[in-house]
Amino acid sequence: TGSVRGGVVASSRSRASCAVMSASPSAGANAGAGTSQQSALAAKVIDGKATAQQVREEVSAAVAAMKPNVPGLAVVIVGTRKDSQTYVRSKRRACEEVGIESFGHELPESTSQSELEALIDSLNNDERVHGILVQLPLPAHIDSQVVLDRIALEKDVDGFHPLNMGRLCMSGREPPLAVPCTPKACMELLRRSGVEISGKRAVVLGRSNIVGMPVAMLLLQANATVTICHSRTQDLPSVVREADIVVAAIGRANFVQGDWIKPGAVVIDVGINAVSDESKKSGYRLVGDADYQACAKRASLITPVPGGVGPMTIAMLLTNTLAAAERKFASS
């Protein structure tokens, strides 16, 4: 069985146990090395769904082992955005599957700043709640930063509290209590796929506080040489071509082209974009920030969209919640 220590998944399985669907015989521990031979081979697909299921099983075992104590996660949503409601349902369902108690708070669009802050204060003081997640985005009349800062540090399972973010960026100091879930998911997929990070060149496309900046810090801590690219980066394709590891988190559909990818590189696609597709009942389909078909012809490993980083992000939320509960129960 596995456990979660300090928010980092530790499993009795090998770190290279990440599920991959292969069309290529050469990937894994040597991924990112890059050879001309690999350029003619299709990438192995990192199966985020299967890997997330492994993590859920590990969390479920750890939750069962701490009985009669039960971890609790409060999920707060304001308004009726369909995408936010879908994300919240997924998170609450994931909690139920692993034995974490879920406390849902669905507030109307008209909820005021002071009302939301009062709810956060109440949850901070609720002994049953070990983690608090406020679903973003919030309505325009609410200051999201003030709300996120109000969450108690020890219950910040999203990892967005200024102290957690600050600790993430500082070496030789106390580590953050929680790491943002999507960046943590990217790193866990790399590790469980057997990708050697130390000494490799990593390029991160995007510099958001939610993904780009924290994943760059995590890669740096893993001893990668990291370049952060953004809208002002000159000759972007040439920069990306130097990368052994590419993390695409720029929010533009099919932006990263196949000929940007160094043969044998690893592509972690964080993007999730809707593009028109009349063949679908919904009228659209989801794609990532990388041109999947083109990039897969040159990469050694690649995450699909959907089914890659997304499922692992929710799994990392579970590990962060479990770690918060473990800290609380150990101190009481």
Image (tube, rainbow, N blue to C red):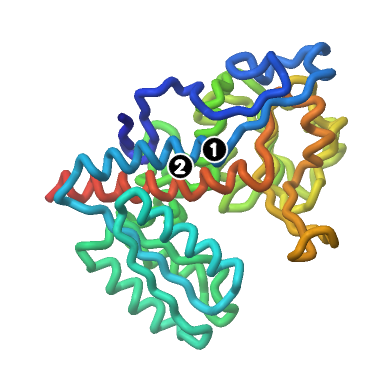
Q: Which is more toward the observer, 227 or 322? A: 322
Residue 135 relative to residue 154: left or right: right
Q: Position of residue 82 (x, y in %)?
A: 60, 72
Q: Which is more toward the observer, 14 or 149? A: 14
Q: Quadrant of the N terminus?
A: top left
Q: Which mark is residue 59?
A: none
Quick check: marks 1 and 2 in contact, CB under 8 Å? yes
Q: Position of residue 95 (x, y in %)?
A: 37, 54
Q: Which mark is residue 217?
A: 1
User: Which amino acid type corresponds to the residue marked 1 in the rendered image?
Assistant: Met
Q: Secondary structure at mark 1?
A: helix
In the image, farthest residue toward the bottom:
110
Q: Position of residue 263 (x, y in %)?
A: 79, 21
Q: Residue at x 61, y 19 (%)?
A: 28
Q: Residue at x 42, y 64 (%)?
A: 149
Would you place residue 176 above or below residue 92 in this image? Answer: above
Q: Is residue 124 visible?
A: yes
Q: Please give the residue where the numbered disc 2 appears in the rendered image.
A: 168
Q: Position of residue 35 (x, y in %)?
A: 78, 12
Would you place residue 210 above or below residue 114 in this image? Answer: above
Within the image, what quadrant is residue 106 found in? bottom left
Q: Residue at x 59, y 74 (%)?
A: 81
Q: CA distance from mark 1 to mark 2?
A: 7 Å
Q: Secondary structure at mark 2?
A: helix
Disc with the residue nearer the chain's start (1 vs 2): 2
Q: Which is more toward the observer, 50 or 10? A: 50
In the image, farthest residue toward the left:
332
Q: Residue at x 65, y 45 (%)?
A: 270
Q: Residues within 10 Å of mark 2 (few under 14, many from 20)?
A: many
User: Which amino acid type corresponds to the residue marked 2 in the rendered image?
Assistant: Leu
Would you place residue 148 above or below residue 36 in this image? Answer: below
